Image: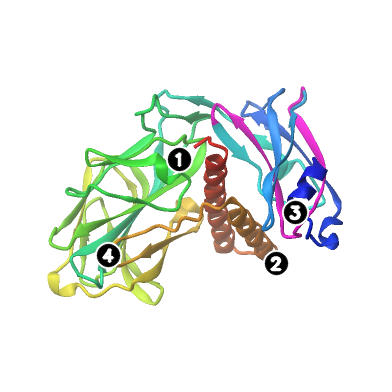
Amino acid sequence: MLGTALCLLGPGAPRAALAQSERSIEGRLSLPGRTARGVSVAGAWVTLHRVGPDTAGPLDSVRTAAGGGYRFRYRAFGDSNAVYFVSTNRGGVNYFTPPVRERAVRGGIADLIVFDTTSAPVPISIRGRHVIVTVPDSATGRNRTVLEAFELSNDSTVTRVAAGDDGVTFDVALPPGVTVVVPGQGDVSAEAISVVAGRVQVNAPISPGLRQVTYSYEIPTKREPIEMLVEQPATVLEVLVEEPQAIVTGAGLVNVDAVTIDGRPFRRFLAQDVAAAQVIRISIPPSASASSLRLMMIVTAVGAAMLLGLGTYTMRRGSAVARRRDDDPEALALEIAALDAAYERVDSPNEEQKGEHYMKRAQLKGRLNNALAKREGLA
């Protein structure tokens, strides 16, 4: 296997790049159980991957032992920035360890917890819903962009999957008249998000824990007020509006301190423990609108339920809204490694720094999972 990997570098590869250290990754595969160790999963295939700027691909595969354990011994090769990680698949859902560069990795981050799947109606709760409303685009002034982000929580011990090809795992109503959405950067692939009969539908598996779904759409400026239905309870509801004279009502939203994003102020409205069957109304006087920047970074405060994490979204304004298609596994894995390296250099991180690192890492890992699943034909 090593010889094959070295050949991938090509005859021009520098000798120094090939003489790297021998390494090992040792972990355990388990299902959730009544004890902290869970239930061992024996006989399952786990695969060691390498991702680097030069080459990428699987290196080796083994079956887990009777106690669910596995071990890989390998020799690092090629570009020294390459990272290594382990994956497995259960019920059509991929699971990955974080990418590592350490010489010896065992337990902890090398352990993989997998879940059984079900198409039964496992409850998916909304921990956070965040709405960002911009000023009209600078080109025509006819439309404004709205971005919505959901933090979904599966508090069970099984992964919810769609029942059949046309099944969904999560859906939500769009404002009246909206028929097209642009998927954003989250924990589900763009192909898993669609619009059917005025609703955003997600058919991606939702495993236990928190998962993020984001999308954006354009709404005509003449459609006032903007109305959004709260169909399910939400732990945190947040609305950011760029126009300073905007009026936001409904769902118990309260005007709190404004936030500044990329030098531009946004009014912020917040509510907690929001009940279902309510309507958010956003009214914007025509004279309040101004021109939007063509490019701006939207950073929203997620709230207490998300440990002060920061979710970052990019919106490009103009004749259309486009999402960044960072579907390159190599780039994503290296970005995670760089993020971890920067975090390790922080002495005694505070709660905000911890939360920010956690959220950024979770978002990148979700995108890496999707990118790898696409490459392997599993998504």
- For marks 3 and 4, give the one nearer the viewer: 3
Amino acid type, residue under disc 1 in the picture: Ser
Q: Position of residue 145 (x, y in %)?
A: 28, 61
Dot 4 falls on a residue whose secondary structure is loop
- Is 135 placed left or right of 100 in the picture? left
Is residue 356 inside the magenta stretch? Answer: no
Q: Which residues are magenta?
A: 66-92
Q: Which residue is mark 1?
A: 153
Q: How crowded is the residue under tag 1: few (<14 C-alpha within 10 Å), some, or many (20+)?
A: some
Q: Mark 3 vs mark 2: which is more N-terminal? A: 3
Q: Give me the residue at 66% from left, 43% from top.
A: 97
> Is any atom of residue 24 visible in this view?
no
Query: Closer to the camera, 144 or 347?
Result: 144
The answer to which of 109 and 136 lies nearer the viewer is 136
- Secondary element at tag 3: loop
Residue 63: x and y, percent?
A: 74, 27
The amino acid type found where label 3 is placed reads Leu
The residue carrying mark 2 is 345
Mark found first going from the N terminus, 1 or 4: 1
Q: Which residue is mark 3?
A: 9
Measuring 57% from the left and 43% from the top, which residue is drawn there? 372
Mark 3 and mark 4: Cα distance apart in space: 43 Å
Q: Is residue 351 above or below residue 8?
A: below
